[in-house]
Amino acid sequence: MDEAPVTTPLNGQLEVGLRVAMLLAASYPDSLDIGRLVLLDHALLHSGDLGGPTSVHPDLPLRAGELGMKRAAIRGGADFACRLGLASMQPEVTGIEFKASERAEGFLALLEADYAKELLSRASWIQMRFKDVDNTSIRTEMQSVFGHRSEEFGVAAGVGE
């Protein structure tokens, strides 16, 4: 018998969808693919590891392993942001990309929770920090931060491609 999936507010579809919308709004008018969103979402939560503002999520020892499990959550979050009208999906030569809608920034500005404000601040930092950095360079930087743990958890292969 199949069990219903466990739902949790932490890293649930709503939270991930809002984080995706924040990253897309900070990148507007550029669009981002899932691989890039995976990398940038990790940077959003663990900005302190990359020389940015203090991380909003705790510095757990196995955080490097999050990258390997993040792709499906980010895809679900991107789909959710599209259903909310905060983003759109568009085909590109390289694959599917997501772009913030024109109303995303205004909606996100209405969020009053301290956590949301912290994430929005870091999304702006990420846009400035990684705008002209390719995915391979971001992965390399993350691997240098996490050292051999990235390799142990398979983070290096297939993430952000």
Image (cartoon, rainbow, N blue to C red):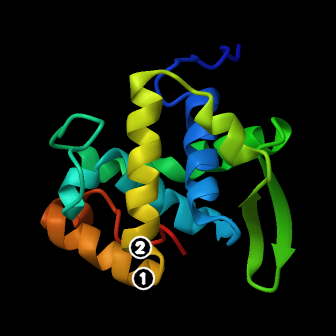
Q: Which residue is mark 1?
A: 133
State the mark number for residue 153: none
User: Is residue 76 among the parts visible in the rendering?
Assistant: no
Neighbour class for label 1 at 10 Å: few (<14), some, many (≥20)?
A: few
117 or 140: nearer the eye?
117
- What is the quadrant of the C terminus in the image? bottom right
Residue 79: x, y in percent? 76, 45
Question: Which quadrant of the view contains residue 90?
Answer: bottom right
Where 92 sits versus 118, above or below? below
51 or 154: nearer the eye?
51
The amino acid on which the numbered mark 2 sits, given as a three-letter code, is Phe
Q: Are marks 1 and 2 in contact (CB under 8 Å)?
A: yes
Is residue 140 toward the left or the right of residue 100 in the image?
A: left
Where 23 sits versus 18, above or below? below
Q: Residue at x 23, y 62 (%)?
A: 50
Is residue 1 toward the left or the right of residue 139 in the image?
A: right
State the mark number for residue 130: 2
Label 2 residue SS: helix
Residue 8: x, y in percent? 52, 17
